[in-house]
Amino acid sequence: MSYRTGVVKIANLLQTSSEWLHGDSGGAGNKVVLCTRVRLARNLNHHPFPGWAKKAERERILSIIQPAVLSLPEMGQAIVCDSMDHFSPLEKQVLVEQHLISREHAAKSAGSGLAVNKPRTLSVMINEEDHLRLQVFRAGLQLKGLWKMADKIDGELDERLDFAFSPQIGYLTACPTNVGTGMRASVMMHLPALVLKEQIGQIIKAVNRIGLAVRGLYGEGTEALGNLFQVSNQMTLGESETAIIERLQKVISQIIDHEENARVTLLQEKARVVADQVGRAYGIMRHSYAMSSKEALNLLSLLRFGADLGMFPESCRMAIDECFIKTQPAHLQLDYDRKLTTEERDGIRSDFLREHLKDVPAPDCAKLGTSTPPSTEESQS
């Protein structure tokens, strides 16, 4: 079975930035929130879950779901649409780094598939842990708007596919922790001030106590590099999608307030220390010739923090944000025909950062603290 429809090479994904990175810095908490994601897990009636299905059955499920996904108005002309066995290990890792697939889906092969729309605001994984996992993305804090978008797409798919649903407990999923709504809503937050003031630990504990999860850049089990944290719901049973979204929205707004207050305190008590750290990060990035992925993310976090505080022109924010993804290992290696050593990647990463950030001027300490904190009210555009 051919699953190639509207396919482009993975390398083409790197020619333009994901639309969810193009946030309006003046709205929806974008100085603290990078992006929002809502994911729905669904399964077909009368078919075994992917983990229990043989290859022939998985391919049959793929052939059922594929036309329904490609017919979605939101999918348009899919920029990526392929079976997972057609991707190289490096290409799969690029997709993971772009947050378009999970690490678990990257391990899949024949019988599993992927479809991504051109602006990369919609990604559908077929035969990951569940038969279908659709993900929608937007820049900034967009929980309510994204839930409406996901619900609309889910309704369109429900007209074409026979989803496994129980009137008593809701949508049936391979893992019991997803039963019910099958929804995971998550918000990617940049929290440098809470980290610098050593308050992040108590924030994480408080969030965990109320049934939400805090994870690193690439989800469960990953480190919070670059002061980036994903906050998401854990419970999917016994609570409606709207209630989950509203509860998460309230908590995210509170975390934004804590981060903004921590920034104000830092500027009042340690403005020179903040300016020094941002300045050192800028100097290292502009003049280094070898840099690890971890160091790059942590230094980029300081540059973004400096932009938030007014030390860099607002127009520089996009260049900084793009580097969070484009300096990841697989992105750096995609143009090469072989696997690069760690030393080679570190050199290429430094070369990329010097070139990509060459138009970012030196930080202006005189403007430290002149940037106005954004409202935590969510944009509904």
Image (cartoon, grey):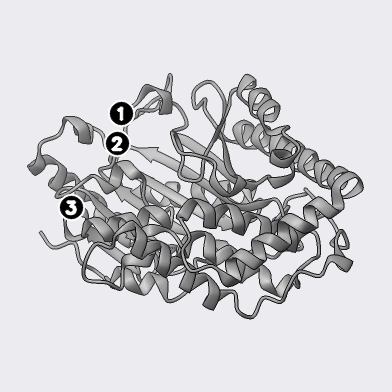
Q: Residue at x 43, y 19 (%)?
A: 168
Give the label on residue 129, or none: 2
Callout 2 environment at 10 Å: few (<14), some (14 to 19), or many (20+)?
many
In this rendering, does residue 130 appear at all?
Answer: yes
Quadrant in the rendering for residue 172: top left
- Provide the residue designation for mark 1: 174
Q: Residue at x 72, y 41 (%)?
A: 196
- Provide the residue designation for mark 3: 63
Give the label on residue 302, or none: none
Left or right of 306, for residue 371 = right
SS assignment at label 3: helix
Residue 29, how many percent across, how many down?
73, 52
Quarter of the rendering occupied by the C terminus: bottom right
* Front position in the image: 160 or 268: 268
* Front position in the image: 251 or 70: 251
In the rendered image, the vertical position of residue 296 relative to residue 354, given as above or below: above
Task: Give me the C-alpha separation between circle 1 and circle 3.
Answer: 20 Å
Q: Are marks 1 and 2 in contact (CB under 8 Å)?
A: yes
Specify the amino acid type for callout 1: Ala
Specify the amino acid type for callout 3: Ser
In the rendered image, the vertical position of residue 108 relative to residue 374, given as above or below: above
Callout 3 environment at 10 Å: few (<14), some (14 to 19), or many (20+)?
some
* Front position in the image: 230 or 174: 230
Total number of numbered discs in the rendering: 3
Q: Mark 2 or 3, which is nearer the eye?
A: 2
SS assignment at label 2: loop
Task: Give me the C-alpha separation between circle 1 and circle 2.
Answer: 6 Å
Q: Residue at x 28, y 42 (%)?
A: 128
Q: Are marks 1 and 3 in contact (CB under 8 Å)?
A: no
| Residue located farthest toward the right when viewing the structure as drawn | 268
Mark with earlier residue (1, 3): 3
Residue 64, how many percent across, how many down?
21, 50
